[in-house]
Image (cartoon, rainbow, N blue to C red):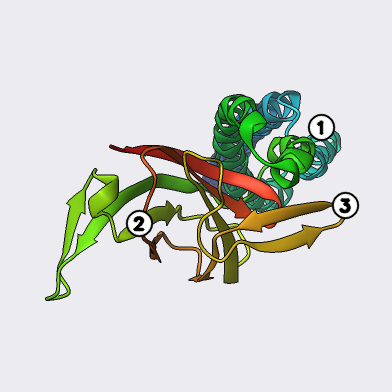
Amino acid sequence: MENQKSNSSLKAVIAVLAVLLVGSLVYIFKATSDADAVKTELKTTLTEKESVMKDLQELKATYDAAIAENTSMSDELIQERDKVVNLISDLNKSKGDVNSLSKYKKQFFALQSNMKVLMAENDELKKENALVTSQRDSTVVVLGESKKYNEVLVGQNEELSKAVEKASKLTILNMKTAAYKMRSSGKQIETDKASRADVLKISFTIAENEVAKSGDKSYYVQVIDSKNNVLGNKNTETFGDSSLVYSFITNVKYENKTVQVTEDLPGKDFAKGTYFVNIFDKNVLVSKTSFTLK
């Protein structure tokens, strides 16, 4: 009887020990799994932090390169670059937890979006500057020819040279001038004969420019014949210390899209020789061309 009790007690002890052993194994397994999960999450977080840091460094490098070009947008670019630098500093100091990384990612995407807009504007500005340089080089030829002009035109050359260097935001392209004979039916026939010409047709294109100010725009058109006479109205407009003798004014409603402009300058007894046509934005020469009548 005593042996049976002893066996029962032993079995009970063994059962308790077995339960404790199983519980210990389960606890150890869970603790090990939790530790592995923490390590995995920590490793993933560190990798994401490094990725965000790399993206921010590349963003900063893009701004540094654009700022080095020293355009008129440099101040705006520097401000955005400083925001990136501050975010890099904050990210370095952060613990790199999931919540903070999510916040830094959102800030990075916002800065990246701003960068794309600014880079597009900066690229457009560089194109305009390149065009202005080309126009300035062409102006040297115009100034050489203008020595034959009357005293009014000679007086404005220096102001024009300075104004062209500053350039206009709007670009004039594809400027053309041709002479036409008017039929009694109203039909116009192009001609290169001075004796047959009744009207000069002047056309040009104002290029699309999304960042320019829209609204009404006025250009002064100056047509000079082979005898250095200004044709048309011969009105004079004063701009500060300079004045401009022009043939007529053309008014354009500009809405940031490409605009085709065509104007007619009637006349008679046109002289043979080379004619010069200049377009001014106030006192700034923005385009020029020439043609010859036989």
What amino acid does circle 3 point to? Asp
Viewer-proximal residue among 278 and 284: 278
What amino acid does circle 1 point to? Asn
Q: Is residue 122 left or right of residue 94?
A: left
Q: Secondary structure at mark 1?
A: helix
Give residue 104's position: percent from left, percent from top: 70, 47
Q: Secondary structure at mark 2?
A: strand
Q: Are the residues flagged by discs 2 and 1 in contact, CB closer than 8 Å? A: no
User: Which marked residue is nearer to the observer: mark 3 or mark 2?
Assistant: 2
Does label 3 or label 2 sit earlier along the sequence?
2
Say which residue label 3 marks. 241
Does label 3 or label 1 sit earlier along the sequence?
1
User: Mark 3, residues whose alpha carbon is within 10 Å: few (<14), some, or many (≥20)?
Assistant: few
Does label 2 or label 1 sit earlier along the sequence?
1
Query: In the rendered view, would you say 78 is above or below 66?
Result: below
Q: Separation of disc 3 and disc 1 at Cα?
A: 59 Å
User: Mark 1, residues whose alpha carbon is within 10 Å: few (<14), some, or many (≥20)?
Assistant: few
Give residue 87's position: percent from left, percent from top: 79, 41
Give the numbered dot on residue 200. 2
Q: Separation of disc 3 and disc 2 at Cα?
A: 31 Å
Say which residue label 1 marks. 92
What amino acid does circle 2 point to? Leu
Give residue 236's position: percent from left, percent from top: 70, 62
Viewer-proximal residue among 93 and 203: 203
Report the residue at 14% width, 74% height from top.
184
Q: Separation of disc 2 and disc 1 at Cα?
A: 69 Å
Report the residue at 45% width, 52% height from top.
207
Q: Are the residues flagged by discs 3 and 2 in contact, CB closer than 8 Å? A: no
